[in-house]
């Protein structure tokens, strides 16, 4: 079967391999059957292996976008009388505030302009103030608003010195950037099936410490996103409480198999190579970037939008889309940007083709040199 290949430079869902697409072409099966439960169990075990968290952690999956996993963690982990400190330097940190507010969870946001690096000393000052009574910190590892990788390990260290638990949104870093839970010791991390693991959209998962199960038993504010109840469903029957996206599960199983063939180092190195080529070619074209090099994740670039009167993002997007390339608009950073990501089943040849198409757009728009 021929499937047209699209180059998705948006930060997920990403370009998927034909093998992952074809993995969904399976006979129909009731997800309550033992055969399907065994597949789900194998996925859970292998997700733990990816971050070397086999002994101390468990994983629970939900049929949802990644935001569902974040909602499950926040609404289940924060004690009923607890307070959540949210590190907000991007749209996905802000989304954590929206979730907490929707459920009436007491929270405090450390909010800085999108593109600024968190001030560790300010965070330490906030959590050491006993009057604030913070029990939990949530932070985004790779903030795709800007392409910044936040100082998660340091934040975890500060939190744990003060008896505080940590929730880490690893949506676009899991399986694409180094994550060392033995160093972080984070209580909860969250990701989804459609980012760096290179499966299809439709599943989120929360990896969390086994020792926390009894603690969160009565915390849940949500019926569907009850982390404890969902975990007990898996433990007692091997099943999700509610209907899973069956074909997406098969696709994730194939994506995980392909990850282990490539190896973690191979995946990380491929993304890094893609990133270096993308950055080099964009620099040659005259583009500038929102972040300094030391803050770049190596997965996504927030590119400053040109000030040329001929430039128009929508026209650039449509030009690229018609040629098989998807690019992404900015999302509230302190300067106007568009975003290009290298996650997914992409290779250096794909990045070169994309930057050639971008160069052709500039020429067709009459932009001889980019103005800032």
Image (cartoon, rainbow, N blue to C red):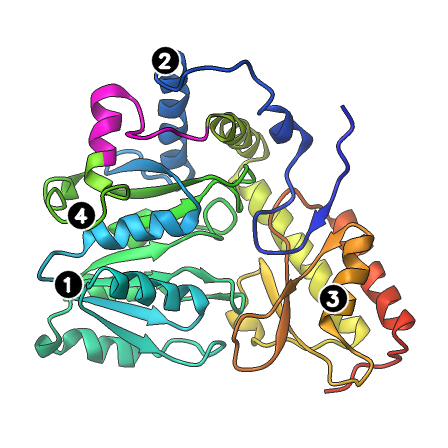
Residue that numbered label 2 is attached to: 33
Number of marks:
4
360 and 331: which is toward the camera = 331
The tag earlier along the polypeptide, 3 or 1, is 1
Separation of disc 2 and disc 4 at Cα? 28 Å
Label annotation for residue 220: 4
The tag earlier along the polypeptide, 2 or 4, is 2
Q: Check if mark 4's residue and mark 3's residue have beta carbons within 8 Å.
A: no
Q: Quadrant of residue 165?
A: bottom left
- The residue located at (61%, 45%) in the rendering is 344
191 and 75: which is toward the camera = 75
- The residue located at (64%, 25%) in the rendering is 22
Secondary structure under badge 3?
A: helix
Residue that numbered label 3 is attached to: 280
The tag earlier along the polypeptide, 2 or 1, is 2
248 and 224: which is toward the camera = 224
The tag earlier along the polypeptide, 1 or 4, is 1
Residue that numbered label 1 is attached to: 135
Q: Is residue 194 visible?
A: yes
Q: Residues within 10 Å of mark 1 (few under 14, many from 20)?
A: many
Q: Which residues are magenta?
A: 230-245
Quarter holding the C terminus? bottom right
Q: Is residue 233 magenta?
A: yes
Secondary structure under badge 2?
A: loop
Q: Check if mark 3's residue and mark 1's residue have beta carbons within 8 Å.
A: no
């Amino acid at each position: 079967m021929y499937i047209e290949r699209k180059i998705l430079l948006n930060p997920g869902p990403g370009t998927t391999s034909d093998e992952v697409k074809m993995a969904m072409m399976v006979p129909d099966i009731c997800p309550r059957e033992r055969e399907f439960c065994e597949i789900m169990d194998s996925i859970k075990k292998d997700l733990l292996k990816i971050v070397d968290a086999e002994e101390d952690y468990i994983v629970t999956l939900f049929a949802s976008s990644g935001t569902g996993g974040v909602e499950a963690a926040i609404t289940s982990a924060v004690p009923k009388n607890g307070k959540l400190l949210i590190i907000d330097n991007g749209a996905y940190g802000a989304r954590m505030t929206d979730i907490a507010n929707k459920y009436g969870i007491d929270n405090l946001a450390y909010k800085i302009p999108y593109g600024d690096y968190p001030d560790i000393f300010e965070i330490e000052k906030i959590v050491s103030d006993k009057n604030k009574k913070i029990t939990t910190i949530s932070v985004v590892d790779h903030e795709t608003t800007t392409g910044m990788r936040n100082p998660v390990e340091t934040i975890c260290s500060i939190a744990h010195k003060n008896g505080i638990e940590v929730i880490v949104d690893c949506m676009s870093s899991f399986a694409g950037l180094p994550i060392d839970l033995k160093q972080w010791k984070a209580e909860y991390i969250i990701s989804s099936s459609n980012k760096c693991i290179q499966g299809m959209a439709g599943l989120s998962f929360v990896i969390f410490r086994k020792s926390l199960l009894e603690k969160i038993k009565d915390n849940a504010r949500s019926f569907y996103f009850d982390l404890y109840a969902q975990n007990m469903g898996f433990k007692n029957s091997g099943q999700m409480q509610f209907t899973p996206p069956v074909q997406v599960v098969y696709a994730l199983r194939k994506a995980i198999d392909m990850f282990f063939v490539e190896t973690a180092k191979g995946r990380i190195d491929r993304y890094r190579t893609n990133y270096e080529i993308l950055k080099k070619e964009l620099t040659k074209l005259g583009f500038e970037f929102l972040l300094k090099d030391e803050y770049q994740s190596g997965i996504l670039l927030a590119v400053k939008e040109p000030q040329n009167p001929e430039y128009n993002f929508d026209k650039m997007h449509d030009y690229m889309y018609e040629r098989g390339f998807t690019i992404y608009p900015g999302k509230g950073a302190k300067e106007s940007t568009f975003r290009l990501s290298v996650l997914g089943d992409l290779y250096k040849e794909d990045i070169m083709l994309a930057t050639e198409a971008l160069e052709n757009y500039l020429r067709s728009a009459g932009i001889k040199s980019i103005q800032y």
